[in-house]
Image: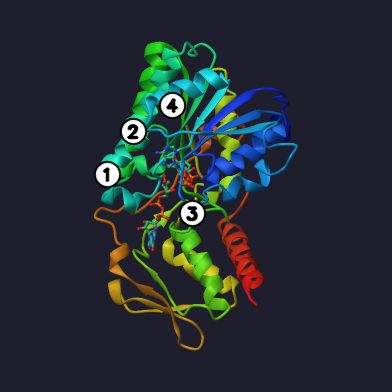
């Protein structure tokens, strides 16, 4: 990444984020504040604490209530979106809010469509209704899940979509409504088609974080085995803060457009597990096939086993993205290698478990 672009001063610009409490929302907020933005974030009412990832920011007296403001809201509530837009009058909107778990989307397909699909439409329409369409720039968190049963390898902005889950199909609606409102009403709306990106802040139900958390617990004797689903699935895994920096770059272009952000490398879930266990000093060897496959450590203890409950009704087998357009037009390039990403995540979870020990 060129330093010049990432350090451009944006003093006083106003950004509005949905999904501010999520992995990406927290990194993007830090980066926007560093660039001089005033940041407003939508948070959901919850019966338990859901702001841990941004707590360090809003508890800082120089930031919370000064340059960072939180507002209750939900992507299923149009009147709330209208009010929020009128109150905040943002220059840039980052729509990161979503029911983002692919497997869960098979259990709650209608809700996923409401939030991830129609939620995007609600937001765009609110921009039109409150008269912000000339002023605002809109980033939509689109996804490599759109490619699903992939039609090209690697996948580019020109690869046809073939989603394989209610999540992918809901995000497909989100993608096309962005394109439509851009063409129909001239709204500066962009899709970032982001491949999987991970970090120590990744939600605990996604496979990378589930693995690194369990590796740490196993390493310190708090657990025996991690149960996983499809070990053969291949993903293009990058490091989240680099991807959120890419989101910002997408919105700084004079002409709105759609961009793939990826690493152009792919690895199986098995390889991720292998690398994480190796990093924690527990190298694995594999035995068996299909649902009977196990990963054993040097002492022969089973450390990875299969639970078919984690299989999906329809799977995305292979993702690998070509980020050539982003490199050329945005000067964006991922820096963190696969091995480095696994190391960062495993180290963070090892440290967390170490610190929690009596
Ligand atoms: P995440 O950690 O799961 O965060 C999702 C955020 O959306 C949370 O802040 C969540 O709030 C909020 N949210 C959920 N339902 C909502 C609703 N009904 N109304 C308003 N907000 C709602 O996801 P992430 O990894 O940061 O991803 C950010 C976005 O990028 C998502 O749209 C995701 O689908 C998309 N994406 C992610 C990846 C990836 O690899 N991470 C790749 C491509 C695209 P709570 O904290 O209250 O639950
Ligand atoms: O699964 C396999 C699983 O849930 C990755 C979201 O951020 O990235 C994410 O979606 C792979 C799949 O991420 C387990 O079958 C095996 O093939 O970590 P995941 P995802 O489905 O790729 C995209 C780009 C998004 O847009 C989404 O919002 O791993 N897998 N065993 C498992 N997956 C999980 N979760 N748990 C397992 O035990």
Q: Residue furthest right?
A: 62
Instruction: Measure how far apart labels 3 and 1 are at the Cα level.
Output: 20 Å
In front: 161, or 97?
97
Asked if residue 160 shows in the view, the reply is: no
Residue displayed at 56% across by 61% down: 342
| Disc 4 element | helix
Mark 1 or mark 4: name the one nearer the start of the chain.
4
Write the residue at 53% across / 65% down. Answer: 212
The count of marks equals 4
Q: Residue beneath label 3, please?
A: 203
Q: Secondary structure at mark 3?
A: loop
Query: Which residue does the numbered mark 4 point to in the structure image?
Result: 80
Say if disc 3 is inside 8 Å of ligand 1.
yes
Q: CA distance from mark 2 to mark 3?
A: 21 Å
Neighbor class of circle 3 (other Cα within 10 Å; few <14, some 14-19, many 20+) is: some
First of labels 1, 2 by sequence position:
1
From the image, which quarter does the C terminus lie in?
A: bottom right
Q: Nearer the viewer, residue 145 or 37?
A: 37
Q: How is the image coloured?
A: rainbow
Q: Which residue is mark 1?
A: 109
User: Height in image: 243 above or below 126?
Assistant: below
């Amino acid at each position: 990444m060129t330093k010049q672009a990432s350090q451009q001063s944006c003093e006083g610009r106003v950004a509005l984020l949905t999904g501010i409490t999520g992995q990406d929302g927290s990194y993007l907020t830090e980066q926007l504040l560093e660039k001089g933005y005033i940041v407003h974030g939508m948070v959901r009412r919850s019966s338990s604490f859901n702001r841990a990832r941004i707590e360090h920011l809003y508890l800082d007296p120089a930031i919370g209530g000064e340059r960072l403001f939180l507002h209750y809201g939900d992507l299923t509530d149009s009147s709330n979106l209208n009010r929020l837009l009128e109150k905040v009058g943002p220059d840039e909107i980052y729509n990161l809010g979503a029911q983002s778990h692919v497997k869960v989307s098979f259990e709650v397909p209608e809700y996923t469509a409401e939030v991830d699909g129609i939620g995007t439409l609600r937001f765009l329409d609110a921009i039109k209704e409150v008269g912000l369409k000339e002023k605002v720039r809109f980033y939509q968190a689109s996804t490599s899940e759109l490619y699903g049963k992939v039609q090209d390898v690697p996948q580019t902005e020109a690869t046809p979509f073939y989603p394989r889950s209610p999540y992918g199909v809901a995000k497909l609606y989100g993608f096309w409504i962005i394109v439509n409102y851009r063409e129909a009403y001239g709204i500066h709306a962009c899709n970032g088609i982001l491949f999987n990106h991970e970090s120590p802040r990744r939600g605990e139900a996604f496979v990378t974080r589930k693995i690194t958390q369990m590796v740490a617990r196993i390493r310190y004797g708090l657990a025996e085995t991690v149960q996983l689903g499809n070990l053969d699935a291949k993903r293009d895994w990058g490091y989240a803060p680099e991807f959120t920096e890419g989101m910002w770059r997408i919105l700084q272009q004079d002409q709105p457009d759609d961009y793939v952000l990826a690493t152009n490398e792919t690895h199986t879930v098995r390889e991720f597990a292998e690398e994480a266990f190796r990093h924690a000093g527990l190298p694995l060897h594999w035995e068996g096939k299909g649902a009977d496959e196990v990963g054993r450590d040097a002492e022969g203890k089973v450390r990875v086993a299969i639970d078919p409950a984690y299989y999906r009704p329809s799977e995305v087998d292979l993702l690998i993205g070509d980020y050539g357009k982003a490199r050329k037009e945005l000067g964006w390039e991922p820096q963190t290698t696969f091995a480095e990403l696994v190391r960062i995540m495993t180290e963070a979870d090892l440290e967390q478990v170490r610190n929690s020990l009596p």
